[in-house]
Amino acid sequence: MSDYDTVSADVEHEEEIPADHPRYQDLLTRHRIETGIEKGITHLQGMHAEGRGSAFDYLLGEETIPSADTAERAAAAHLLLADQPVLSINGNVAALVPGEMVDLASAVGADLEVNLFNRTPERVEAIAEHLREHGADEVKGLTADARIPKLDHQRAKVDADGIYAADVVLVPLEDGDRAEALQEMDKTEIVIDLNPLSRSPQVAAVPIVDNIIRAVPNMTEHARDLADADEAELRSIVDEFDREQVLEDAEARIRNGL
Amino acid sequence: MSDYDTVSADVEHEEEIPADHPRYQDLLTRHRIETGIEKGITHLQGMHAEGRGSAFDYLLGEETIPSADTAERAAAAHLLLADQPVLSINGNVAALVPGEMVDLASAVGADLEVNLFNRTPERVEAIAEHLREHGADEVKGLTADARIPKLDHQRAKVDADGIYAADVVLVPLEDGDRAEALQEMDKTEIVIDLNPLSRSPQVAAVPIVDNIIRAVPNMTEHARDLADADEAELRSIVDEFDREQVLEDAEARIRNGL
């Protein structure tokens, strides 16, 4: 362990983490994942993934860099333009930003679909229930009556009227294989990932290199700001977006600091 | 999750992880921590710490860089010169390198002492037993009859004839508060940590920025190589070691690549 580990492991509620602690966001996300594991909504490996992300966030400066904000605005425009947008939810997403994903779905008129790397019926149901507790009306992913081509059985499962049919999908914290497979289905894919070099952001139409706890509320804010925009304005935001620039900016920030 | 997560979570034994997998070391360490949690020797937060470390290791190139090798040789020389060297073992260390720590203790004539951030009697005993299963004769840390000054009760506990009395201590994966407190006791402190900017390596006499699964066997190899060296030779290795250079090299590698 290291110096980020100096708040006791015995925090029962996230309100006990001092908001002015220099590692507040890191401690908060770790606590939420830990709670997710205890509730059965997050896989143990989600704790490893979160730890990995936290190192990249540390190097990014633990803030939404300008190019990430641009990507979040472009993502909001894509979701608003979509015919059938779907927000994919895995165990870490459910643990970290359940209410925030419900808010975003509402702001852009998208469906929420549970989609897990380590899929079990119990965990799918626990996550759906967790989202309902945070205000979701309908949660997809329980039917799982369609398959993403080129993936093995469990990981290919999606809803026929959900991710399978979607034109724009937000897949935060997605694994590379599935991100590639969705890309090959010609969907517009929005990925949130703190490592700009990993495969998921590399294949995404809109790679967002930011912490999900900052990214999702900011996308919702952009969506609300763009609620009255006409299609031409949304289209121009989407057309002007430069995914290569966003990936390069994030890597430069991680490698070289400010 | 991200692209490192494409080996199934269902691996039961580490032999199932293909040794030629590009992420072999990362998958192996994750699997060992997961097994450690299942066995009750590793705290859940150890999975987060390991994930965080894995991101820094990824940026380092997942290899022992030359300056880390130099630090590992200096650490071996310090341990061989010591009157009372002690190797500190926490839940992640026990899960990742139990036999390797026993080998190092034997090569340099050091004691092993269990020392936990989240201390419970059950976990101390489980780790001591785990070390005995890996060949340890005697394991300290169960008496806990002395206290490190300036730390709160649970985290201050050490053995009076172990870490408390030691002149040279290896504290791999140590938290910053305890690393500082040990430093203030005027011990020669050797730290293994993949983040060169975290407090523990910053305060250590010998900061080793390397993955513990590579660092510990390499320290043992250096110790065996130096077994017949006289005190003057060991002293000159120690005197020539430049901790600032090691920290700068590691940061430059992480920030800028090769």
Image (spheres, coloured by chain):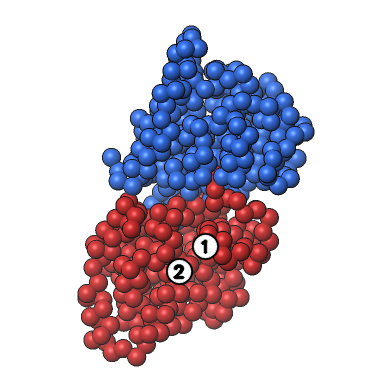
Chain colours: A red, B blue
- In the image: residue B249, left or right of residue B29: left
Label 1 marks a residue whose chain is A
Whether residue B9 is visible here, answered yes or no, is no
Label 2 marks a residue whose chain is A
Q: Residue at x 44, y 55 (%)?
A: A58
**How many angstroms separate mark 2 from mark 1 (CA)?**
9 Å
Q: Secondary structure at mark 2?
A: helix
- In the image: residue B256, left or right of residue B239: left
Position in image of residue A61 (x %, y %) = 41, 59
Position in image of residue A108 (x %, y %) = 40, 82
Depth order, front residue of B50/A146 = B50
Q: Residue at x 50, y 28 (%)?
A: B216
Q: Secondary structure at mark 1?
A: helix
Dot label at residue A43: none
Q: Residue at x 54, y 26 (%)?
A: B100
Q: Amino acid at mark 2?
A: Arg
Position in image of residue B61 (x %, y %) = 35, 40
The crowd level at tag 1 (other Cα within 10 Å; few <14, some 14-19, many 20+) is many
**Quadrant in the picture for residue A161:** bottom left
For the N terminus of chain A, the quadrant is top right
Give the answer, above or below, for where A252 lies relative to B78. Answer: below
Depth order, front residue of B63/A21 = A21
Residue at the disc numbered 2: A214
For the C terminus of chain A, the quadrant is bottom left
- In the image: residue B178, left or right of residue A168: right
Depth order, front residue of B57/B10 = B57
- N-terminal label among 2 and 1: 1
Residue at the disc numbered 1: A25
Contact between marks 2 and 1 (CB within 8 A): the answer is yes
Give the answer, above or below, for where A136 lies relative to B63. Answer: below
Position in image of residue B46 (x %, y %) = 57, 46
